[in-house]
Image (tube, rainbow, N blue to C red):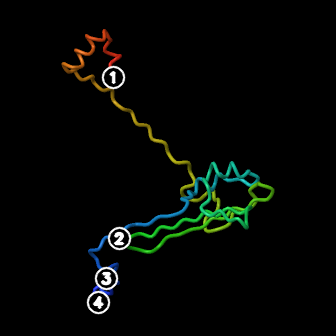
Amino acid sequence: MTSLLISGCAGVERLPFVHRVDVQQGNVVEQYDLNRLEPGMDKRQVQLILGTPMVDDTFHADRWDYVYWMQPGRGERESYHVSLRFENDRLSEITGDLRPDPDAPGAEPPQSTTVTVPPQQRKPRGLLSRLWQWITFSQDDELPR
């Protein structure tokens, strides 16, 4: 009887009303960041642009791999891989699914957004705050918020 109940849950992922979570792992590499890479950059400069690589291979210290995959709850898995090779601690080659391309969409720098916060009006102080101000001889600006 138990085996029938357990095996009945095997096809749950196909049911339309069951929620499935999106799973994302790895390094998100943007086209803009790839376009900023130049041959001859040292490892520190590359790490400042792309971040720490997902795969740290002990046997290939001169190769950094940036791996990304996204499995939506419903739909096909998306993945890509970018490998950077270094010679004498300098970037020499970029291979993989994504390559530097200044003409590609998304090659422009991300636009910045400026948010202006309107000034806030001061709330009137309560009885205890005014009493504390009177006891400590403090000014209104010195009170803790």
Give the labeled residue for mark 1: 144
Along the line of sight, which residue is nearer the eye, 143 or 41?
143
Left or right of residue 143: residue 75: right
- Amino acid type, callout 2: Arg
* Mark with earlier residue (1, 3): 3
Number of disc labels = 4
- The label nearer to you, 1 versus 2, is 1
**In terms of depth relative to the viewer, which is nearer, 92 or 12?**
12
Report the residue at 61% width, 68% height from top: 97
Distance from the alpha carbon under mark 1 to that under mark 3: 57 Å
- What residue is shown with label 3? 9
87 sits left or right of 21 in the view: right
Task: Answer with the quarter of the image where residue 105 lies.
Answer: bottom right
Q: Residue at x 63, y 59 (%)?
A: 101
Mark toward the start of the polypeptide (1 vs 4): 4
The residue at which mark 4 appears reads as 4
Three-letter code for the amino acid on which mark 1 is drawn: Pro
User: Does residue 2 lie above or below 73 as drawn?
Assistant: below
Residue visible at 29% across and 74% down?
A: 18
Please state which amino acid type lies under the numbered disc 3. Answer: Cys
Q: Provide the secondary structure element on which disc 4 rests.
A: helix
SS state under label 1 = loop
Q: Which residue is mark 2?
A: 20
